[in-house]
Amino acid sequence: TQPNLRQVHLIHAELHDELRAAGFDVCAGVMGENLTTRGLELLALPAATRLHVGDAAVVQLTGLRNPCVQLDRFQPGLMAACLGRDAGGALVRKAGIMGVVVTGGEVRPGDAIRVELPPVPHRPLGVV
């Protein structure tokens, strides 16, 4: 069997800011995420990056969350608002990233997050 690559869902709080500015009623946790970050460019991190959260927890990034119809069931239009296009016209999925727990531990609001990049060459996050 294949491992569950979607154990932990992380969203950057800047997405919530963007969505609220567009009229959506969102805040930390309402889009199914387990962790909300601020000031960390989650979508730009490479696959296999490890995030050390708090004193002990470690999450390894596996890929991008593909926005789905569940977002529209929560608030109509939310799925489309979580998609965009880059300067070259390529689809940008903004609904967060997924990861797996490498080391468990208690995680609390305000915990520091340390980024451990994988060895080069880095692979961009793909959809999981």
Image: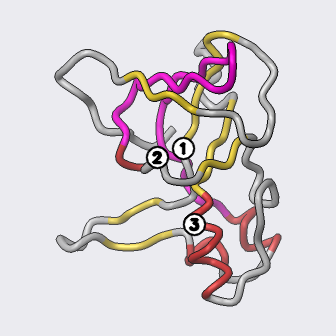
Task: Report how far apart the C-alphas of labels 2 and 1 lie in the structure.
Answer: 7 Å
Q: What kind of element bears circle 2? A: helix
Residue assigned mark 2: 42
Q: Quadrant of residue 102?
A: top right
Q: Is residue 108 left or right of residue 24?
A: right
Q: According to the image, label 3 marks what residue?
A: 15
Dot 2, how many residues are within 10 Å of its Cα: few (below 14), some (14-19), or many (20+)? some
Q: Which residues are magenta?
A: 45-68
Distance CA(mark 3)–CA(mark 2): 11 Å
Report if the CB atoms under discs 2 and 1 are less than 8 Å apart.
Answer: yes
Q: x, y (%) of residue 57?
A: 68, 18
Residue drawn where x is 61% and y is 88% of the image: 22
- Quickly name the residue at label 1: 97
Percent coordinates x, y for residue 75 in the rendering: 78, 78
Q: Is residue 56 magenta?
A: yes
Q: Which mark is residue 23?
A: none
Q: Residue at the location (61% across, 18% down)?
A: 58
